[in-house]
């Protein structure tokens, strides 16, 4: 059982260290900018939808 676990750990290390291709710094930066931009756009859309919903509800149920 312990030998199987050790072999599994060695295989995992070999996979991560030698068989995996890691992105470059510029690729990571580009991906981060894309994710940040998409997050901001979605947050803006949710904020606008909230304002519209608030306006509609205040029109239906006035204070």
Image: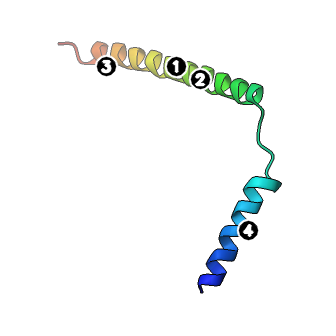
Q: Secondary structure at mark 1?
A: helix
Residue at 30% over, 13% down: 59
CA–CA distance between discs 4 and 2?
Answer: 35 Å
Q: Nearer the viewer, mark 4 or mark 2?
A: 4
Cα–Cα span, label 1 and label 3: 18 Å
Q: Residues within 10 Å of mark 4 (few under 14, many from 20)?
A: few
Is the Cβ of the residue at disc 2 closer than 8 Å to that at disc 1?
no
The answer to whether the residue labelled 4 contacts the one labelled 2, judged by CB atoms less than 8 Å apart, is no
Residue 13 vs 50, above or below: the answer is: below
**Left or right: 25, with 36 as reference point:** right
Which residue is denoted by mark 4 in the rendering? 11
Q: Position of residue 7 (x, y in %)?
A: 70, 76
Distance CA(mark 2)–CA(mark 3): 31 Å
Say which residue label 1 marks. 45
Q: Which residue is mark 2?
A: 36
Mark 4 or mark 1: whose residue is earlier in sequence: 4
Residue at position x 34%, y 17% in the image: 54
Is 52 drawn above or below residue 21 in the view shown? above
């Amino acid at each position: 059982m312990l030998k199987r676990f050790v072999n599994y750990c060695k295989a995992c290390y070999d996979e991560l260290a030698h068989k995996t291709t890691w992105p470059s710094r510029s690729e990571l930066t580009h991906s981060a900018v894309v994710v940040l931009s998409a997050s901001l756009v979605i947050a803006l859309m949710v904020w606008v939808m909230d304002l519209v919903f608030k306006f509609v509800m205040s029109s239906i149920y006035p204070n």
